[in-house]
Amino acid sequence: MQEDFHYYATYCASYLSGFDHQQSLDICYSAQLVDLCSRTFLKKNKAPQSAATTQLQLEMMDARTDPVGLQDITRIWSSFHFLPYDLNAKVKKGAGRQYRSKYRLICNTNGDLLVDTIKLASGKGLQAAGLAMHILADTWAHRYFAGTPSLVINNTNYYFYELMPNESGGLDEIPISFRHSPSAPDDLDEHKYTNSLFQSSENSIMNLGHGRAGHLPDYSFIRYKYLPAWGGYEEIIKDNPSDYYHAFCQMIYALKYLRGEYAEFEKDTYEWNTPKQYESEIKAIIEKRQLDACADWKAFGEKLSGETVEPFDLSKYEEEYVSANEKEKNSTFLGQFILAALAQKSMVTNKIFTSGNLLAGYSIDFDKMGFRGIKDYKMLVEHFRKELGI
Amino acid sequence: MTKWQRIKGVLVGLVMLLAGAGMALLGAEAAPLIMGILALSLTLGGIKTLFYYFSMARHMVGGDQILIRGLILFDLGSFTASLTQFSQLYIMGYLLAVHAFSGFVDVLRALEAKRFDSPSWKLNLSTGIINITIGILCVVFMKSMDIAVYIYSAGIIYSAIVRIILSFRKTAVAYITPS
């Protein structure tokens, strides 16, 4: 997903769920920040680098793909963009441990980890809510891909067709051609899209997430079919308009839970009624064939609240964080976001580790072993102890 | 990282360190050794790829390509090992490709970091310039086997040091059970 959905559509979902204009802005800002909070950004602001929620394109090119480097990449992408669906999924007969570990990181909607993610954000403030909304929305866009570099899971081949509605109510299959120039914009009229280069190395960074399918999963309007590498030659039909509407309604439900309107967050539950009166308007935005739907979502959001939805500005909260003294940093906007990011990464790493999968690295239970490991997480431990008055 | 992985990292690093220093001392005489290392790495790469095919890629759509790649690499390794005379051009070409590519990536990283006002851009730029300079040296001293061996040895020593440092890095993530 892109800024149009993570920022503007999240604003709309927040407002519809009952948050006011300013709260909705904080939520959608945090949701969008997940795509920009890189090590480079954190380094610039002298913030803990383990809180990175994304990697810039060139950070990835530079990233090591030895076991430790792969664990770092997997922690970032599995925790925030490709939440694994089933950490105990059964695999094909004869598949070894390595294959099984990667297969179990495939992202999909309504997994146990989604419930854990939303519950973790409960009572933790608007930044944690926004961060959770990013993760929830991405489970719909990025389903069927894994947040770890893997050729055997994430690769795609020439079998790729766009499904275009025709006049008789059916769908025409139009072959998609891919090119590898990152600077060339996708050509919707010619069905030419950019994807990452084929790299036969299992752990090449080119094989991370949906790189081999280009930006197709990030466009709300598109429907397509393809053969996923892991699927045993069974094609997948991806209906993004339907998935994006589900994501929107599930976000409203999750945000209502975070506001305390529901006592429990349950899987496969959607708030269909709240946006009912706007359904056709929302679906029209989602289905409009365009590379960037920011303007349409912004207009819709402003119509809902009657307020101006300011454009996303990465530097908005930097000064507040940089100028705060050490004791106050955690209370700043960025400080709260960083704590939420560390908590999410720690939780997902723990779940993957305790399932017997080492792809995201090692997790040490603080309650049993005390503090060990990467020192950036000490601030999370200290914050937690402070909250409990220990 | 497990304790065994840490021990392995340090041991492999120490062996690489000794090999790099030894080759630098030998100078041009170490050239056949470099050819041997290249042949061995291609052959092992082929075996590793074939193992990858049988353990993972055979489950993948289009995995047969991996099988073919493994066979070609293995064949290329055997061919390199069978060369009776070492090729200076071969070694220089290898070094040039590795350093020029790394340098190019480092410079791009520096430009990106500068765009974000991150102080790390200076470090990235300097490592990029060093790598590109080494690449240029490979072209300038195409005919000097001594220089080729020194550059190759320096690369091995650098990798060894990085490997040893990384073996001591803390990698575990703390987890607090939600109350």
Image (tube, coloured by chain):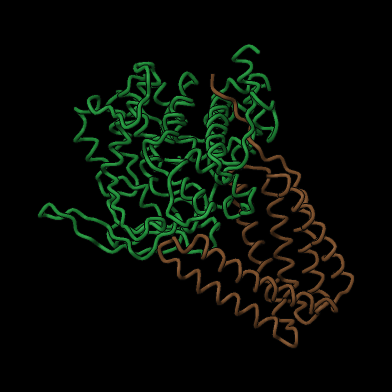
Chain colours: A green, B brown
Depicted B85 relative to depicted A275: above or below: below
Residue A81 located left or right of residue A238? right
Q: Outermost residue toward the right?
A: B25
Q: Nearer the viewer, residue A183 or A209?
A: A209
Q: Residue at x 51, y 65 (%)?
A: B53
Image quarter for residue B11?
bottom right
Question: How many badges with numbers are in the image?
Answer: 0
Residue A62 located left or right of residue A278? right
Q: Outermost residue toward the front?
A: A93
Percent x, y for residue A134? 43, 35
Q: Outermost residue toward the bottom?
A: B84
Query: Is residue A37 in view?
Result: no
Q: Nearer the viewer, residue B96 or A44?
A: B96
Q: Outermost residue toward the top?
A: A389
Query: Is residue A113 in view?
Result: yes
Question: Can you say which quadrant of the picture contains the N terminus of chain B?
Answer: top right
Q: Residue at x 35, y 30 (%)?
A: A267
Q: Nearer the viewer, residue A308 or A164?
A: A164
Percent x, y for residue A91? 43, 50
Percent x, y for residue B113? 62, 47
Q: Residue at x 49, y 58 (%)?
A: A151
Percent x, y for residue A302? 31, 28
